[in-house]
Structure formats: C-alpha cells, structure tokens
Image: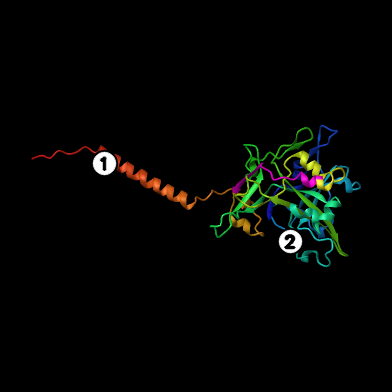
Amino acid sequence: MCGRSALSLNKTELQGACSFKRKESNIYVKPDWLVEHNDGKDYTPSYNIAPTDVTPVLLSSSKYKNATKSDRLLKPMMWGMIPPWHKGNYKNHNLSTNNCRIENITNSKLYTPILNNGGRCVIVVEGYYEWQTTNKASKVKQPYYLYAQQKPEVKIDEPNTWDNTYDEENGWRGIKLLYMAGLYNIWQNEDVIIYSYSVITMESNSSLSWLHHRVPAILDTQELMEAWLDVDNVPPNAAISLLKPTNTLSWHRVSKLVNNSKYKASDCNKKIPEQKTNKEKQKTLTTWFTKTAKRQNENCSTVPSKKNKF
C-alpha cells in the first residue's frame, strides 16, 4: 500500500524534474502547471504527505488543449478520490480511496468508469513511506522510506548532494523521482470543484515482500509513463496490463516521528541505523566475551614464571 509520501521540490524544480523528450524533438520540454479549483488549496512541499493533502499529479494534456501547448500537465490534486456520486461536503464521503487495488479496478463501481473515461494519471513523489507488517514480534511497526535508485554521489536524505539543474539539451540532472500510476476524478457541487486521485497498488514481489504485502504501481521507465498517460491511443485494459511490481527501489529505515501526519519536518526521511535482532545482539555479546577470555589466556601464557628461591 502507500500511506505517506514525500516531495520537497518547489514548482519550478518539479517542472524540470518532470521534463521529457517529444518523439519528434531532441530537446527536453517541461510540463505546464494547471492550477485551478481544489477549494483554494495548492501544492506545498512536504517531507510527510498524508491523504487529503494536495500534491502534484502528471496528466496528458489531450483533455486540456485550451489550457496548454505542452503534451503533459502538472496539476495539484487531493490525495483520496472523492466518489462521483457523493453529495454534500467533499471531506465526508467516508470511503477509503487513498489506494485502489489493481485486482479490482476493472470491475469496480468507483474505478471502472473512471478508467474507461481516460482518468489515468501519474503521482509524482521523491519517495514513499511504508510500515513493516511482516515482523510479528514487533509491537510497533517500523517505518521505512522507499525511493528511486540514485547516482552514487546523491543521498536521498541530504538535499545538498542533489544537483537540481535543468536545460533543454540535457534535461534534469537532479534527484530521480518516483512515478506512481493512479486514477483521478473531477468532483463538483454547487460550491467547489475538486480534483482528487487514488494510487494503484498490487501484490509485492520478492524484493519487497519482507516489508509489506502491497506496493504502489511504479512507472520506472519513460516508455511506461508515456503509455500510461496516452489515454487516446492505449486502451484501458492494455494500460493496466503494463503495470508490474518494480525491482528498482532503494530503501532505508526512518524515525517513528513520521507516524504523526502533522509532523512535516525534513528529518522524516533521514536514515537511521538498523536495529540488531536479539540473536545478533547475543552473538555480538558472546563474541566479545570470547575475545576477552582469549586475550586473558594469551596474557597469562606470556607472563614469565618466577623460580622459587630457598
């Protein structure tokens, strides 16, 4: 599943990070921002994004030709899809729509019509948090931060190591982002219009099953992302069939401070040392005593014996 994420880039940096090459061009182009609606809420960079927060989402511009000349758009949207049939306050629909299971998308009352109507999108993050559910001995679930594999000199939790620069010839040279496949919907009543989305999830593969049994659908190549966004030429079932668990993620253990959705500070994704298991602790203790005893024996064997004088 995906319950929290992080994205600290500002809007200008994010345009560079999401730049892409058109098929007929050798230069990188940036997606335009489409900022409207959402009850006055806009994207705010955060190290601890939670459901109901507003985050950047990539869209095909085919439905928004009057708003942009770019092939792709960045649109702030609320995390947690509002059902089209919901009436009243958009905050009170009482459904869990932060994630949608890929197994149910094609026969869902909520998601099937949206999928068939071209509601495919890409959620942009630097990484996401997951809590280990496979360790039954632990009373408190340990959170981990998962993210794209970076260049050796780039540390995901040290922004001063990111070369966040962009130009048309070389594109983006900064931090590598994660792109999650999702579905979005436009909901409205007499007062507001809200864009909202759900992250598509699937069964974990062997690389992440130690952590959790569900993972978000990651689009880890430009070809995959292009196909997912191409709602005019790639049919819904064909697009769904392209989604597979990825083997390209890195991760590290983080503080339980991230458990509090109101805590947004930059130390949320900081790497902390792995804790040793009881067996590892016992092994370390036994090794220490063994080495100490060995040194004592060696010292005793090297002490010269004193001859008795009578």
Magenta stretch: give its range.
238-252
Residue type, label 1: Cys
Report the front residue among 233 and 71.
Answer: 233
Report the front residue among 171 and 247.
Answer: 247
At numbered mark 1, what does the secondary structure look like: helix, strand or loop?
helix
Distance between the alpha carbons at the discs numbered 2 and 1: 69 Å
Residue beneath disc 2: 96
Residue type, label 2: Ser
Residue beneath disc 1: 300
At numbered mark 2, what does the secondary structure look like: helix, strand or loop?
loop
Give how far across and how far down residue 46 sits, in percent. 69, 53
In the depicted structure, whether residue 52 falls above or below residue 211: below
**Which residue is depicted at the point 43% across and 50% down?**
282
Q: Are marks 2 and 1 in contact (CB under 8 Å)?
A: no
Give how far across and how far down residue 98 sits, in percent. 73, 57
Total labels: the figure holds 2
Give how far across and how far down residue 78 sits, in percent. 77, 56
In the depicted structure, whether residue 69 falls above or below residue 191: above
* Picture quarter with the C terminus: top left
Give how far across and how far down residue 218 sits, in percent. 72, 46
Residue 273 is covered by the magenta coloring: no
Report the front residue among 237 and 287.
Answer: 237
Query: Is 138 on the left or on the right of 248, as rendered?
Result: left
User: To which quarter of the image does residue 37 belong?
Assistant: bottom right
